[in-house]
Image (cartoon, rainbow, N blue to C red):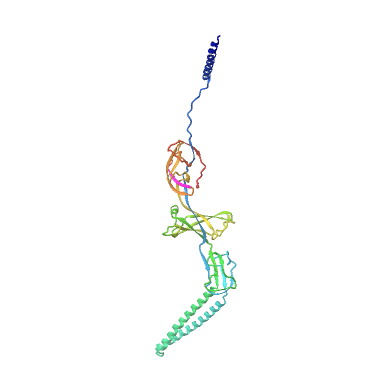
Amino acid sequence: MSKITRILVVPLAVLALAALGAVLLVATSPSIETVAPERALTTVRTIVPKPQDIRLQVRSQGTVAPRTESAVVPEVSGRITWISPALVSGGFFSEGDKLLEIEPRDYEMAVQRARAALTRADSEREFAAAELKRQEGLSARAVASTAQLSQARRTGRVADASFDEASIALEQAERDLARTQIFAPFEGRVREKQVDVGQFVSRGAPVATIYATDYAEIRLPIADRQFAFLRLPSLRNPEAGAGPKVRILSDFGGRRHEWTGQVVRTEGEIDARSRMVHVVARVEHPYDAPEDEPDKPPLAVGLFVHAEIEGPVVENVIVVPRYAMRDDAHILVVDSDERLRTREVEVLRIDRDDVLIRATLEPGDRLCVSPLQVVVEGMPVNAMADDFEGARS
């Protein structure tokens, strides 16, 4: 083989072998299947709406106050000779208990003088009556003059007036004597004592401050828009009918305690500064401990409390989280085909983080609670159950 032949044959052979290898590689290569990429679905959280009957509540707060607070004021002057052991700051007493006693001797003597004066006036009256009868007899026989008869009648009238005056003086002296002892006008507790045994007190000067404990009252401010959720006595007739029940809550001694009361009246005006209407709740026997809670503290005067006032029952209501609302009147639901839909609702009330609504839903609808930025009606979604539980169950 010539040199020229070798130069031509070798490259051609290499090319032929390369072409054969390429054909073999293409022929034996695996086939590639073309697959269209799947569209990613938006994942949303959902809850199952549960229509239910719910009793509305209005929350408020206030301070416990006594229903009656009075200053103990003596009606006579004198030195204090005795004070009840209950007449101390924080002491309890019952209606009719004697609280203190003022030295009675001066008033006992005044009663004795008044009785003596009454006896004298009674004697003068009897003598004047007998004299008048005698003069009338003499006048009938034309023995006594008209002037003598007139004088006897005048003496009789003066004697009667003196007797009446002496009777009134005796009654006044006996009343003053009785006023040397001061009795409790109601069942209550002592807020403050200002005197002690041996001290002289003047008529009209306060000696103590007491308040009633048969029931306590709490003034609760209510916004006018909250009145729609309550059944309260109206401003026109503040005491008409019994009001709703009130749940009283307070933290004391590191624990939360509860009492039950009732709204008894509505104050007859709107507060000019806060634009609030005050209702008054009453709690009976606030200092009595229940048998099942002997260590329960009393609902003491001055205690700050939270109140939950019962309202009417509303039917077929759905409680949804506030963030699930799209606007003031719409929600998003996931239907049975896993597609997102908009539903119009009626908002009954917004209560803190919950919204009470009424809505007409289709079977299989679930409420979407995810905060979506872009919503397309009917778009498919991937729904996941959420663990939200409404404030009311």
Residue 21 spot, x, y in % from top left: 54, 17
Q: Main secondary structure of the magenta part?
A: strand
- Please name whichever residue, 374 or 312, is drawn nearer the observer in this view of the structure: 374
- Please name whichever residue, 125 or 319, is drawn nearer the observer in this view of the structure: 319
Left-right relation of 66 to 329: right
Magenta residues (range): 354-360
Q: Residue furthest front?
A: 3
Q: Quadrant of residue 362?
A: top left
Residue 52 spot, x, y in % from top left: 47, 45
Residue 53 spot, x, y in % from top left: 46, 47
Q: Quadrant of residue 4?
A: top right
Q: Residue furthest bottom?
A: 143
Figure check: 37 above or below 266: above
Q: Residue drawn 40% across and 88% down?
A: 147
Residue 354 spot, x, y in % from top left: 48, 47
Q: Residue drawn 46% across and 85% down?
A: 128
